[in-house]
Amino acid sequence: MLGKLGVSCAHMSKAETSYMIKAIKVTGGNLSWEPWEGPGEPPADHVEIEVVWTAINRADLMQRAGVYPPPPGASDILGLEVSGRIASVGSGVTHLKSGDEVCALLTGGGYATRVVVPAVQVLPVPKGVSLETAAAIPEVFATAWLNLYHEAALKPGERVLLHAGASGLGTAVIQLATAFGNPVFATAGDKAKLEVCRNLGASGVWNRNEGSFVDAVTAWGGVDMVLDPVGGNYIAEDQRVLNVDGRIVLIGLMGGRMAEVDLGIMLIKRQRLIGSTLRSRTVEDKGEVMQALYRHVWPLLAAGQIEPLIDSTWPIEEVEEAMAYVAENRNTGKVLLKISD
């Protein structure tokens, strides 16, 4: 484990080790938790966060593997979301102050004891929600809101097919869509995960290991939107279950980059295939998404009507094991990493 392999601090004083800034560094695919120079002072419209929790996302696995580099100007440190306490604020920030408990959507940099982030991507922790739970909110609920209600522009009553329903994102999508009046049909890889999807509100489920989902979804009544993190061969089947004016929002490529699209069906049924990522969007775009969450989703979180599903928590020193756990699809919900107290 990294705790056994990391840099020795035996020669340092207790005060020095207590305030040392550290981060996960990736070297040749290997991870190490080591001292770091830090993110620097926050610019006028940024804040610095003392990180308590972060979370693993598939983008972290892909970046580590060298197939998903960070956008230009972003930190090369892994981590797309954190919770913690404000350490300092830029001169132009007036709505946040040192000591505030917050969670934040990042472009990178979360696997560290400190991170600097645009203030518009930071929100106060919902009332009654712990820092641990808050770390599981930003990436999945921002992605869910962006794709359900911005890209697909779902109307009340429209129906959703969701693949990977028991993932961290999937468990957020089921709750959010259901809360806003959009029935969900979820696919997942085993009976236990399907039961989780049902318990969260999915009104239809299908085990992807039992073959094509097309007949089951068609019998359910078809869908107006597919949220697809798989791509590949799924796209052709997604098309077959879409109602007229249906939308496929592609958010990942777990099944491969190449797909067959039936242009005839797309034309006749006025289907749309939309590619969507969150990480590479502008700060302004991310700020708008976070404000939408604050207006529409934060009240539901504070009332306990929805909540992120946390699979497990790991100390940052065990990040290797935690990432392997996610890579093997063993998790149901979010996997968190503890950075500090």
Image: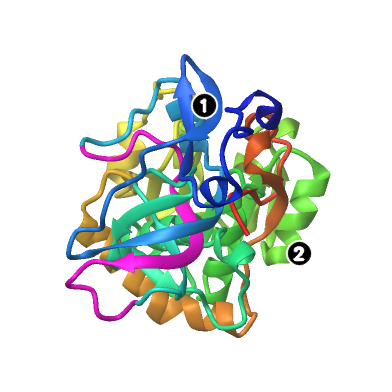
Choose between 333 and 10: the one closer to the eye: 10
Q: Is residue 206 above or below residue 324?
A: below
Residue at the location (45% across, 76% down)? 100
State the CA–CA distance, disc 1 to disc 2: 27 Å
Reply above or below: 161 against 325. below
Foreground pick, 130 / 92: 92
Part of the protein shown in magenta = 73-96
Could you tell me which secondary element the residue under label 1 belongs to? loop
Circle 1 sits on which residue? 255
Relative horizontal placement of residue 330, taking residue 153 as reference (left or right): right
Q: Amino acid at mark 2?
A: Asn
Q: Is residue 234 visible?
A: no
The residue that disc 2 covers is 199
Magenta: main secondary structure equals loop
Q: Which mark is residue 123?
A: none
Q: Is residue 14 left or right of residue 274?
A: right
Question: Along the horizontal axis of the image, is 92 left or right of 218?
Answer: left
Regarding mark 2 in the picture, which secondary structure is present there?
helix
Disc 1 marks a residue whose amino acid type is Gly
Q: Is 93 inside the magenta-drawn segment?
A: yes
Residue 280: give x, y in percent of width and height: 27, 43
Instruction: Identify whether 130 is placed above or below 75.
Output: below
Dot 2 surroundings within 10 Å: few (below 14), some, or many (20 or more)?
A: few
Q: Position of residue 153 (x, y in %)?
A: 34, 64
In front here: 244 or 134? 134
